[in-house]
Amino acid sequence: RAAAARSDFDGRGVLADGTEVPLYANVGTAEDARTAAAAGAQGVGLLRTEFCFLGRGEEPSVEEQVEQYTAIFAAFEEKKVVVRTLDAGADKPLPFLTDTAEPNPALGVRGYRTDRSVPGVLARQLEAIARADEATAAEVWVMAPMISAAEEARDFAAMAATAGLRVPGVMVETPSAAVTADQILRHVEFVSLGTNDLTQYTMAADRMLGSLAELNNPWQPAVLRMVRLTVEGARRAEAEGAGRRNVGVCGEAAADPALAVVLVGLGVHTLSMSPRALSPVAAVLRSVDLATARSLAELAVEQATAAEAAAAVRAELPVLA
Ligand code: PEP
Ligand code: MG
């Protein structure tokens, strides 16, 4: 069945009424990028750059980074590639950037925060991304992970501009970023919801602990409400004249077909997922129109538990039966 579904996938995400929902892939390496392109991804919604450098004791040179990014961008000529700057720390330690002796690594100096403790690494990475952007025809967007305040988004946008990168954005992975999305989006052009971390921080439940899996579930109504707040923030920024603001999702939530419908119903514009999820997600999106997605989103948000939210939505999606 999975194979049949895959062969149906024509590379487009579209609802039954023709509403386009671009579907992108999450990748970590050039090999991943080629696999994603072959699977029909419309672009890359999350390039996890730290996977180019895992296990490395030292910062890679700018030249080496340019080579790695160029190989990835080359798989997506004329397509969008959203590059996430190094997200070191917590579940992804990098010896040249993070201190593994922190008492609470998930709440520590991780992601964008490392630019303060080890200045220079981010600026050099942005320079390498910009050079790879110039060397290829991919449409490169760049975003920072683990943002918790609008001033961080402002500073990141300034750094991206200095490097010559034209489309800056940030990830929404913390409740503070979700509730201040309007302020954040005055400084950057897009946000991408990292629902893995957003769930961890909203529910105050370590994503590495299997024993907390029930809390660590993106169907939790609290997490869905964070997504809704982010979309409302984007609309507010647009109403204030900020220009078009894209809200994407690049966490695992986007790979759950029923949850993907809910995210679209909440107002998310684009979804990024592991390549093997593209076809099943596209199939379910094709089965609903936008009005239905919106009412299923409302249904999910109003449930008391994650299990009830998932069950209520799945029961309304005959294509999943
Ligand atoms: C996320 O947190 O949802 C995300 C996409 O980033 P990562 O899983 O790499 O932390
Ligand atoms: Mg994350």
Image (spheres, grey):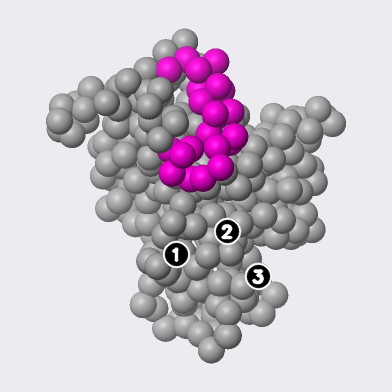
Q: Is residue 17 left or right of residue 165?
A: left
Q: Which residue is most to the top?
A: 17
Instruction: State whether residue 319 appears in this view.
Output: yes
Using a 10 Å C-alpha cutoff, classify the residue at mark 2 as few (fewer than 14 neighbours), some (14 to 19) or many (20 or more): some
Nearest the viewer among 311 and 30 is: 311
Label 2 is placed on what type of residue?
Answer: Met
Percent across and percent down for residue 156 are 70, 57
Q: CA distance from mark 2 to mark 3?
A: 22 Å
Query: Which numbered dot is residue 203?
Result: 2
Q: Which residue is mark 1?
A: 212
Q: Judging from the image, what secondary structure is the residue with disc 1 in?
A: helix
Q: Quadrant of the N terminus?
A: top left
> Is residue 301 covered in magenta?
yes
Q: Judging from the image, what secondary structure is the residue with disc 3 in?
A: helix
Which residue is depicted at the point 43% across and 38% down?
A: 310
Give above or below for 187 relative to 139.
below
For the residues bearing labels 1 and 2, Cβ distance under 8 angstroms: yes
Nearest the viewer among 16 and 80 is: 16
> Is residue 273 covered in magenta?
no
The numbered mark, 1 or 2, whose residue comes first in the sequence reads 2
Q: Nearer the viewer, mark 3 or mark 1?
A: 1
Nearest the viewer among 238 and 195 is: 195
Which residue is depicted at the point 54% across and 29% down?
A: 299
The numbered mark, 2 or 3, whose residue comes first in the sequence reads 3
Percent across and percent down for residue 63 are 46, 66
Using a 10 Å C-alpha cutoff, classify the residue at mark 1 as few (fewer than 14 neighbours), some (14 to 19) or many (20 or more): some
Label 3 is placed on what type of residue?
Answer: Arg
**Which portion, as a residue range, is magenta?**
288-310
Give above or below for 183 relative to 59.
above
Q: Which residue is most to the bottom?
A: 101
